[in-house]
Image (cartoon, rainbow, N blue to C red):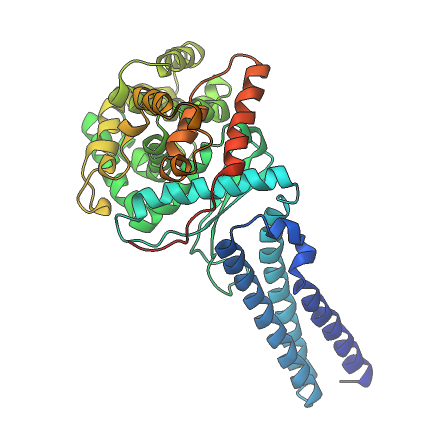
Amino acid sequence: MTDAERRQLQAELAHWRGAIVQLTELDAVAPAEAWAHLEDYLRLRLRDRLTSSIAALSTEGAAVASALASGRPLGECRTALLRLRSRYLAVESTVEFYGDAVQQRTTPRLGAVLRGLDTIAVDSMEVVLRPLGKEVPPALVYPEKGLGAAVLRAGIRLWDQGGLSPVAAIKVTRHNLIHPTAILHETTHQWSHLVGWNTELGEVLAEVATAAGDVPGLGELWRSWAGEVAADVGAFAMAGWSPVPALANVVDGPTTSVHRVRLGDPHPPSWLRVLLNVELCRSWYGAGPWDDLAEAWRSRHDPATLTTRDAAVARAGERLLPALAAACTRRPFRAFGGRPLHALADPERVSPARLAELSRQAGDTLLTSAFLSRSDSLRILALLTSDQPLDPAATAERTARLHDWLARLAPMPLPRAA
């Protein structure tokens, strides 16, 4: 190796070590005022996780410099440098992901609303995890474009391979900041994974669907959809009817798309998904506004207009809905300590009648009482999002009430086991 090659390698190493130094400036990735809109425990946990990954990267850079200075073969040093570069890009991806999420809180109003949604997310996970003695992870809610929400679960390995995600990072779409119940679908993904409900529910769904015997392979289809069915059922148990119209807004489309069964897609076809949610409402509450939604969807997307296998799956699935709804919410599961879901998250608490009773009893204090906000946050969220305004002005008024309340919502408690 020539002196020119050694100097070039030293320059390349200096570049990447300098880039690592830049990563340490977390307030440059997201400004201090944005970090301040995180609850203290969440902010410390997240920054500690990022700082730890950057420190490990810095140590690796120093080791490459030491090897180069001690006269190790340049080929060996270059291999180590390329490995450092690859690790840098992975750490950078992790820092940028969380930095972008936190940076959304720069605007004080949005930052306060998102902090309130962090609290809602944690409250919804506590409903199930606390009675089962499971630790409740902190949540970081961030807005992004698009139709559907998503979650990067706490406890999964991140891009940098330096450790596990310290928080449940939940994407809420901007259009649904006015109706953010999709957060409850995403938090159910988190807690159902932690308690092991998905696999068990898949077995039950397959059993119910196979017993019908209408369409070959129907049981395996429902088994493959268990994770998304669980998330929809969890959102229903937490907020009743309220998540259903928001879901329908997101998953609607052309009739062929609404019935399409996509190989490998964990989501049921939109038709079955929406009608299962309607059936959950009917099974617990009887008649209600969900009947109008079902009638509209049947008029738009009647599977009788199609002759495809997808339509056959839709017709067979529709006949199963009462049995599936009962199995999801009323059957005991090992994941819940031998209890049904409703023993932990009772849909009756968020029935239209019970929500109306809460509104009457609370009166003018509904949105101002700190006690009600902490003891009944999920029911207040359901109440504030359960109607469907028919004009933009009414929607804007409802959104203002919701966001005012979220902005005042107390920070989430420290996650802890029961």
Q: Position of residue 174 (x, y in %)?
A: 58, 33
Extreme residue in the right direction:
4
At 41% from the left and 54% from the top, the residue drawn is 414
Q: Nearer the viewer, residue 238 or 383?
A: 383
At 28% from the left and 44% from the top, the residue drawn is 197
In the figure, 154 relative to 296: above or below? below
Residue 43 is left or right of residue 200, and the answer is right
Q: Nearer the viewer, residue 363 or 325?
A: 363
Q: Position of residue 51 (x, y in %)?
A: 58, 65
In the figure, 145 relative to 355: above or below? below
In the figure, 261 relative to 53: above or below? above
Q: Quadrant of residue 10?
A: bottom right
At 63% from the left and 54% from the top, the residue drawn is 96
Q: Position of residue 1 (x, y in %)?
A: 75, 85
Q: How many discs mark residues in the rendered view?
A: 0
In the figure, 130 relative to 345: above or below? below
Residue 214 is left or right of residue 155, and the answer is left
Residue 406 is left or right of residue 413, and the answer is right
Extreme residue in the bottom direction:
70
Q: Position of residue 67 (x, y in %)?
A: 65, 85
Q: Nearer the viewer, residue 323 or 184?
A: 184
